[in-house]
Image: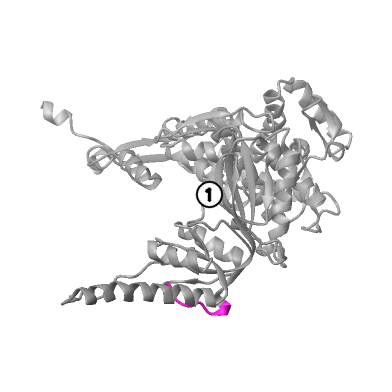
Amino acid sequence: MVGMSMQPYGIQSMLKEGYRHLSGLDEAVIKNIEACKELSTITRTSLGPNGMNKMVINHLDKLFVTSDAGTIVNELEIQHPAAKLLVLAAKAQQEEIGDGANLVISFAGELLQNAEELIRMGLHPSEIISGYTKAINKTVEILEQLVESGSQTMDVRNKDEVISRMRAAVASKQFGQEEIICSLVADACIQVCPKNPTNFNVDNVRVAKLLGGGLHNSCIVRGMVMKSDAVGSIKRMEKAKVAVFAGGVDTNATETKGTVLIHSAEQLENYAKTEEAKVEELIKAVAESGAKVIVSGGSIGEMALHFCERYKIMVLKISSKFELRRFCRTAGAVAHLKLSRPSPDDLGYVDSISVEEIGGVTVTIARNEEGGNSISTVVLRGSTDSILDDLERAVDDGVNTYKAMCRDSRIVPGAAATEIELAQRLKEYANAEIGLDKYAISKYAESFEFVPKTLADNSGLNAMEIIAALYTGHGSGNAKLGIDLEEGACKDVSETKVWDLFATKLFALKYASDAACTVLRVDQIIMAKPAGGPRRDAAAAAGAGAEED
């Protein structure tokens, strides 16, 4: 009888042992909302220029000190399936635009928190979803009306126009240093911008991080900076042709095995000489083709190096194949597989290539000052590794923003001006609606208030006063009234010059709404028992450790 009472019932009787099944509003929907709210509380305090840093130590003991939401959620290994949806939305935003990942997570969290209140009031999730869908469609309409007139067209090679659009994205990562970083990034991007700006490739702006000095020591190199020394004694070449060999510069072992029978000492001597002569012949052929620099992707033999020195050829070794491809792009060279005489078309050209020492680090700098240069490098200087990593993230955001503005240069007011205007207009729209949707739409409008509230809280200002002042200003028709965080007052954004890209806002709000609606649509969670064998995260840690090496 006791055995009978232990029999599983309901859904459990259908599933294998060890399955977990959660259903209904309390177990599934509210639990999911709770998890997403927890995630958004983590990222929310990092929103805006005065956002706080988070210290994240990942499973490999690597330390991250950053306020960049994309990095934070990447390094937190989030297990909860609903919170993972928000992480995926943030990643999509990071890859699409490069900025606004924090807005996605925090806004989705806010939407879900308001949805929870509506559910407790008795609304059904599907009514909330329907209201939210109407609200996002209306938001996109209003957002297009808020676009600054005249910003539809821009010259992507005009540094001032580029900086005005990039400042907000960079300032949210490095407040107070945005002028220096924007100037560096704008120069680097404009140098490598192709004739058709929509084809701009983010990979063409590289970052080299060198310890020591400060941000004001940072500079831009038109070309490439490699953290390696030249092989051999020749350290500098001007206006040189470059031959690139992917397979290495060395005598090759033959494909087939053979046995050589040597009868006398003379034959042994000649045997060594022929090898020498062969290597010399190959290096001589490269020298005669006009190449002054050999770049090798593999090992460089002693004998080959000896003859390179004799023919006054500079030798570099780049072991990473990605780096080798970038070098080929910089110099306009074609990589050969094995050591042979390169044809004139395959040779690249650099204005100068030299080994220099910056802050105690030996670097090789390949410069190409002439037009048509396809790669530029931002050399960042800073006192610690974590500062350099954070600077690199700010530069990456700047470059991604440049890519986004090449496609769509429209801008909307920043500093929470757009959000308050959206909130106000959506509330008017909600009041005109009939049916239960209106409650969801007015909650959606309320959700926008979290932006000025968070910006004010993170800066130590009184959030209630700021929001009231913003509503008053926007109510009297000033749609560009935003927060000036330095003075702690409300100001017109055309004075403070805080503009956000239209594309950043549009995608962030869309992704956040989609993620929130997806979480609300879930009413049952069925989880299998984790598979046996080694734990997944242990295996991942081992794999990542191997990659690091």
Q: Which residues are magenta?
A: 339-345
Q: Is residue 408 left or right of residue 273?
A: right
Q: Is residue 161 left or right of residue 83?
A: right
Q: Is residue 115 visible?
A: no
Image position, residue 416 (x, y; %) = 75, 35
The C terminus lies in which quarter of the figure? top left
In the image, residue 274 above or below residue 431: below
Near-viewer residue (295 or 328)? 295
The quarter holding residue 51 reads: top right
Colour mapping used in the image: one colour
Image position, residue 312 (x, y; %) = 54, 66
State the residue at coordinates (58%, 47%): 208
Residue carrying label 1: 227
Near-viewer residue (63 or 443)? 63
In the image, residue 266 above or below residue 168: below
Q: Is residue 109 left or right of residue 298?
A: right
State the residue at coordinates (78%, 37%): 417
The N terminus lies in which quarter of the figure? top left
Q: Secondary structure at mark 1?
A: loop
Amino acid type of disc 1?
Lys
How packed mark 1 is, by other alpha carbons closer than 10 Å (few <14, some 14-19, many 20 or more), is some
The quarter holding residue 217 reads: top right
State the residue at coordinates (44%, 30%): 26
Near-viewer residue (34 or 357)? 357
Q: Is residue 12 visible?
A: yes
Outermost left residue: 1
For the stretch drawn in magenta, what is the main secondary structure? Answer: loop
